[in-house]
Image (tube, rainbow, N blue to C red):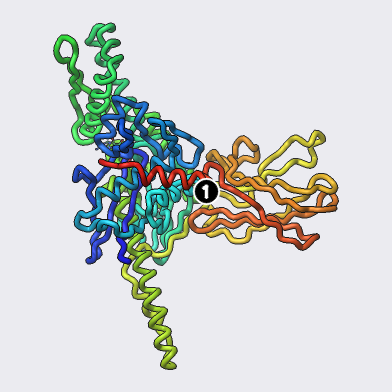
Amino acid sequence: MSHRVIGIDLGTTNSVVATVDDSGVVAILPNADGGQITPSVVYFEADGTALVGTEAVRDAAFDPDNGVRLVKRYMGSEFPLDIRGQQHTPESISALILRQLVSAATGTGGGPAQDEKVSAVITVPAYFGMAEREATHQAGVLAGLDVLELLDEPVAAATHYGLTTGGNRTILVYDLGGGTFDTTVLRIVDGAVRVLATDGHHELGGADVDRRLLDLVTERFGEILPSEELDDLIDDQAWLADLALDVEAAKKDLSKVTSREISVRTPRGRAAVTIDRADLDAACSDLYQTTSEIIERVLRAAGNSGNHIDEIIMVGGSSRIPVLGQRLADLFGKVPQLIDPDLAVAKGAALRAHHLVGSAQMSALTARHAASHSRGGGPAASAGWLRGLPGGPGAITPVTPRAVGIRIEDSNDPEGKRAFIAHMVTANTPLPVDQTEHRFGTIVPNQGSVRIQVYEQSGAVLSPEVEHNRRVLDGELTGLSKLPAGAVIQVTLRISVDGRLTVIAHEPRSRKELTLEAFVEGVIDAAETERLAKMVSQTRVRG
Ligand code: AMP
């Protein structure tokens, strides 16, 4: 069966789809309006149709109860959304966005044909933990996609910038999008990409800049309009929605011009105020300072003082704000690169998808080639075939974005109430993590079961306190018998390359390997998956 291979940047504010054509050229696949960037916004119409994209932004602004924005912020969390009588989740909303992205691209040049199977690499922020990755994978599956891989956005960006091949180097990726900030240090050695450290803030982006500019603009209107008149205007949802759109457009213009007028309709005609780029920079300086502090933190985590960064690449629509490039140039003493910042991640994902499928097809050819040689008694020439692969992103070494550990009860606590997290894997450990084994003890004699709760670090700083970590797996090792207190339980932890966590608990006295029944919190169970799959496939989507 033929299938189309695409890369999808499923962004907090905007999403982009790209593919690589037969001649190896990366192309953006168009959305329903013929554009390249689709707002990641869903609006449910009265008949249940899911409207995705620019029109949805407008409708959701007027009728926010039936619209969903910034859903990526809730991926991996329990966040039911009741809309027009249907119970949605972050996964199902994301799946509807994915469905519309693919459906709009279907039948276009380079896009999939009707009913063609679609295989995709979907990008995720490097700091996404396990639950968020699971949820993103689930969204892809609900949308009917064959998910080839979840690729870290900075790695996709570096691939687009052509920095993952052709020499050894260390790169800092600065990604400021609409709703998230993500910064990562990558090391490229002989074409293999390794994430040295990653950090970010998932509630910081262009939407915050928009809010600051909106405040600034309304403050300025407050200086020229009577206060009751301005209060009435602000209470008018349609007026405020129009102003919010004008403010975002003005913000974008202020990346090109140093001053911009914003005009609004008032009961007595029109009124206008002028905002200088410097005013906006001053209003946002604390936001920008936060990105600088996170960069310092990521450099420390990467063991890099900043002197050893060979390239700085800027990604995300908000990285067009000129002062941000200047700040980076001042910090590193070199000019950052800014090429196609809103399309970079999708293009890199498409290159990766093309490479993955190309490798698989080459491997199949190689296997056949080797078999035919061995039948003839000649040497198998597979190595030569594989070495000749066209320039893809090469091997990618992702890391655990956060420390992972087991919750244990403190046996020194006389009240037996204190618990803490014993981390078994630190943040930024290269994946896969294989067979990290730790030994824990049972607490009371004849303990029949042991609850195994796996946590990941939830903040930027490593802490054993339970509240500074969040639970990702929970299960019960049962069937233990006649063990004294302190009997050894071996816990083995594995994390696969795409962040899936497996925990195996073993009680050596009985030499029985007991199965740990575990589930990732926030990820939906089989019955719920079926319900959502049905709902997603039966919902009409349009852009
Ligand atoms: P992304 O999530 O990467 O698509 O980035 C979207 C964000 O980039 C939105 O907040 C946009 O308003 C913002 N953006 C796009 N173009 C510009 C620009 N020229 N100047 C400032 N912000 C921009």
Tell me the element at label 1.
helix
Q: Nearer the viewer, residue 511 or 418?
A: 511
For residue 453, side relative to residue 188 (left or right): right
Q: Residue at x 39, y 75 (%)?
A: 364
For residue 468, side relative to residue 40 (left or right): right
Q: What residue sits right under mark 1 in the picture?
A: 526
Q: Residue at x 27, y 39 (%)?
A: 53
Toward which corner of the image does residue 389 lie, by quadrant? bottom left
Q: Residues within 10 Å of mark 1 (few under 14, many from 20)?
A: few
Question: In the image, residue 193 lies at what x, y percent?
Answer: 42, 60
Residue at disc 1, CB closer than 8 Å to ligand 1: no
Q: Nearer the viewer, residue 308 or 398?
A: 398
Question: In the image, residue 191 lies at what x, y percent?
Answer: 39, 65
* Res 512 seen here: yes
Ligand 1 position by quadrant: top left
* Res 293 seen here: no
- Establish if 129 lies above or below 107: above
Q: Nearer the viewer, residue 33 or 211?
A: 33
The type of residue carrying mark 1 is: Ala
Q: How many marks can you see?
A: 1
- Establish if 83 lies above or below 393: above
Please identify the quadrant where the C terminus is shown: top left
Question: In the image, residue 448 lies at what x, y percent?
Answer: 79, 48
Residue placed furthest toward the left:
269
Toward which corner of the image does residue 49 lie, by quadrant? top left
Q: Residue at x 19, y 45 (%)?
A: 34
- Establish if 542 lies above or below 161: above
Question: In the image, residue 104 lies at what x, y percent?
Answer: 25, 48
Please identify the quadrant where the N terminus is shown: bottom left
Q: Residue at x 81, y 50 (%)?
A: 486
